[in-house]
Image (tube, rainbow, N blue to C red):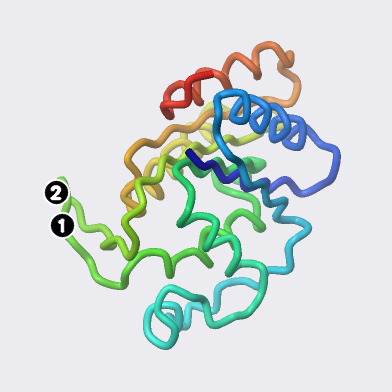
Amino acid sequence: MHALLLNGATRDGGYLDSVERHLEAALTGAGWETDRVVLRRSKMAACRGCFGCWIATPGICVIDDDAREVARLMVKSDLLVGLTPVVFGGYSADFKKALDRSIGNILPFFIRQAGEVVHARRYPYEWRLAGIGLQERADPDEADLFRRLVARNARNFQCSRAGATVLVETDPWGKAAAELTRLLEEMGVGV
């Protein structure tokens, strides 16, 4: 099994870097191969919305930068773990760019599934999506919005499993570690 950790933290040495190291150790200990991408160190332009990844170069973004490799790593992964500060209930700018630039991994065509309209798959992946948000201070409404956003993204990418948690920087590490273990178990990772 293969996992991709996308770290959308905005600064080096912060809380999410510790979370990333903890998750990598847990996944490796459970026999998973992991790739890690620290998005703040990547050279990645914002999506142009040109649909070139659907029309001109199907499945590959027309912008030649690090986002192409991130999209490739997503396709080969069984589990995608997104780590990001919670920004107004959403993702950091770097994480949002990576997600936007992976749109070529799905088709421009729509299908009806479980009463909803979603994009058809381009590749036969069976992603599991785990979103890990970080708040400086607990804000239940913002945390709820983050969880719903992860669920909706997972629905559009047709993930086989999805889950999200929101950690608070001031919580003791033991509480955070227990929540991360719970989320990995929810994703089917035996830790």
**Residue 173 pos. (x, y %):** 73, 16
Residue found 64% across the figure and 30% down from its top: 23
Instruction: Work out whether 179 lies above or below 13.
Output: above
Answer left or right for 32 relative to 120: right
**What element does badge 2 sit on?**
loop
Where 75 sits versus 29, above or below?
below
Q: How crowded is mark 2: few (under 14 residues within 10 Å), some or many (20 or more)?
A: few
Residue lying farthest to the right in this orientation:
13
Q: Position of residue 142 (x, y in %)?
A: 54, 36
Left or right of 130 on screen, residue 69: right
Label 1 to label 2: alpha-carbon separation: 6 Å
Q: Name the quarter where the C terminus is drawn.
A: top right
Residue 106 falls in which quadrant of the image? Answer: bottom left
User: Which element type, helix, strand or loop, lies under badge 1?
Assistant: strand
Q: Mark 2 points at which residue?
A: 115
Count the labels in the image.
2
Query: Do callouts 1 and 2 mark residues in contact (Cβ within 8 Å)?
Result: yes
Amino acid type assigned to the residue bearing label 2 in the image: Gly
Farthest front residue in view: 31
Q: Name the residue under label 1.
A: 112
Mark 1 nearby-residue class (10 Å; few <14, some 14–19, many ≥20)? few
From the viewer's perspective, is residue 34 above or below residue 59? above
Mark 1 is on which residue type?
Arg
Q: Where is residue 98 in the image (x, y as percent from the top left)?
A: 58, 60
In this rendered view, identify the residue nearer to me: 72 or 95: 72
Residue shown at 17% from the left, 51% from the top: 113
Q: Where is residue 172 in the image (x, y as percent from the top left)?
A: 73, 13
> Which residue is located at x 54 percent, y 79 percent?
48
* Residue at the image point whose x is 58% and y is 39% from the top: 33
Q: Which of 155 and 21 is in front in this view?
A: 21
